[in-house]
Amino acid sequence: GESQAGGTFFMCWEDFYAHFDRVYMCELDEVGRKKTGNAGRWVGASAGGCNNYPSFPNNPQFILKASGSGLVRLRLFQARPKNPRAWRQSEAPKQHIGIFIVRVAPSRYAALPGESPDDKTALCAIEEDDIILRTSPFLNSWETCLEIHLDANEEVVVLVSTYKKDVAAHFYLEASAASLPELRPLDKRLASIDVVGEWSAGAGGCMNHATWQRNPLVAVRLPEGSVRCVLTLSIESAGEEHRTVPITVPIGMYFFPGTSSLGNLTRRDVIKQSDPFLTADKISMTLDDVRNHASLLVLPATYDPGTYTGRFRMRLFYPPPRGGGASPHLELLQNHAAASSEVPPGFIPVAGFGGTLD
């Protein structure tokens, strides 16, 4: 006979509208899927916001590794501190949340020399081209999800974020597949120092322009035995906490030996450069190929003169020191003769460089 539980339920639109404000449509897990998960939170520096912000890489990151070829489903829940799975009963306001899947060379998040190969390091810089999949748009719902097909033993980096930066919230990230996947947090971070400068109205653009020497100049001293050092250049803007659209202009960097004469820098002195300049609000460059230089001079530039007038931030990421050796150093070099006495050891002070900052 017919099941007593069968049938059809009707409700008029007026009653439905009066009692409900949303509908959840859920795909049920296939039988036999294996799950794993991690609870975490966005707080302080780890609340980096979406990829509109230069602080985006500060968000929690995870290594996702497939044990067998097939579809892996990621689900991100807004969670309650005392019970990460009690997400529907959360008393906290719902934030806009999203998932990013990043595929880069494993060397970019590999363990540091002398450490366990499993002790991998979080990415300190993520370019737009590194992101292969993302939730779009960000949703202010209790759950959002992504699916990706991975080959056996293939791994990617997963980053979770709120839409705005500096939003404190708890989350639970779950991965499921036919064969139990591996989902491990990347808790280890490179140390960093930074300096803030400014491109004025007279900033000179790239080396295609005769005015290129009018850009600011930054002195960089690398840590002793430096490996895995990364230098980033980002555009700073007023009202950073309310940024909804990134400020993007073509930007790049030129590198010179730290022993170069400041007043006589030429194209021939360049030992590394951005090629090409990228239209972005943040770029990064690894320094492994120039680590034979204990010190560097770095000239940040926009592609054309006057393209952007405002502040920039240069940040050096480096392995946490283990004691001993010279400490890394960043310093914005000034544009007057009095500054020559302030140039760090290892740099040749020469007055008259055409920088733009006082």
Image (cartoon, helix red, strand yellow):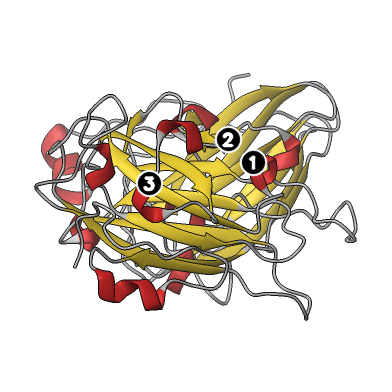
Confirm or deny contact between disc 3 and disc 1 (CB under 8 A): no
Residue drawn at the location 48% of the way across and 31% of the way down = 268
The residue lying toward the viewer, choosing from 209 and 197, is 209
Label 2: state its secondary structure.
strand
Residue type, label 3: Asn
Q: Is residue 296 above or below residue 63?
A: below
Secondary structure under the numbered disc 3 in the rendered image: helix
Residue located beneath label 2 in the image: 102
Q: How crowded is mark 1: few (under 14 residues within 10 Å), some or many (20 or more)?
A: many
- The residue beneath circle 3 is 264
Instruction: Measuring from the top left, give residue 179's x and y in whole percent.
Output: 84, 32
Residue 302 percent across, percent down from the top left: 26, 37
Q: In which quarter of the image is the C terminus?
A: bottom left
Residue 157 - label: 1
Disc nearer the start of the sequence (2/3):
2
In this rendering, position of residue 283 left or right of residue 308:
right
Three-letter residue code for mark 1: Val
| Left or right: residue 103 compared with residue 163 | right
